[in-house]
Image (tube, helix red, strand yellow):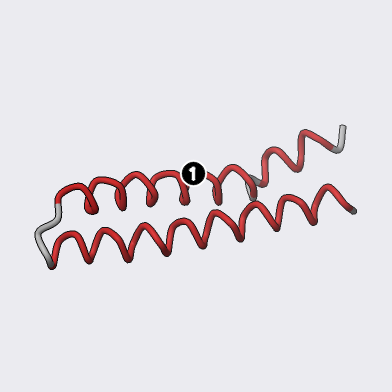
Amino acid sequence: MKRFETRIACASVGVFIWLGGLYATIRGLLYDESALFRYGMLALVVGVATFVIALNPLANRNSRK
C-alpha cells in the first residue's frame, strides 16, 4: 500500500509543477519575458511527464506479476 501512496504523492507534485509552469508561461507571454516563458514551458513538460509516469496504469499492471 505504501508504494501506491508514493506514486500518488509524486503525481501531485507533478501537478503542482505543471501549474507553476503554466503560470510562468502565461506571465512570460503577457509581459514579453522570454526566459520566463522558456522555463515555464520546461516546467510544463516536466510536470506532465512526472504526472503521467507516476500514474501509468501499465506500470501498475506489470508490477503485480
> Mark 1 highlights which residue?
49
29 up-or-down from 4: above or below: below
Check disc 1: other Cα within 10 Å, few if <14, some if 14-19, many if 20+: some
63 up-or-down from 10: above or below: above
Residue found at x 44% / y 57%: 18
Residue found at x 45% / y 44%: 46
- Looking at the image, residue 41 sits to the left or right of residue 4; the answer is left
Q: Nearer the viewer, residue 30 or 10?
A: 30
Residue found at x 76% / y 51%: 6
- Looking at the image, residue 8 sits to the left or right of residue 3; the answer is left
Say which element carries label 1: helix
Residue found at x 24% / y 46%: 38
Which quadrant does the C terminus fall into? top right
Find residue 24 and report its image quarter: bottom left
Tell me where residue 25 appears, x and y as whole percent: 26, 58
Tell me where residue 22 appears, x and y as whole percent: 33, 62
The residue at the far right in this view is 1
| Number of numbered discs | 1
Instruction: Tell me the amino acid under the disc marked 1.
Output: Ala
- Looking at the image, residue 36 sits to the left or right of residue 18; the answer is left
Tell me where residue 33 appears, x and y as whole percent: 14, 56
40 up-or-down from 53: above or below: below
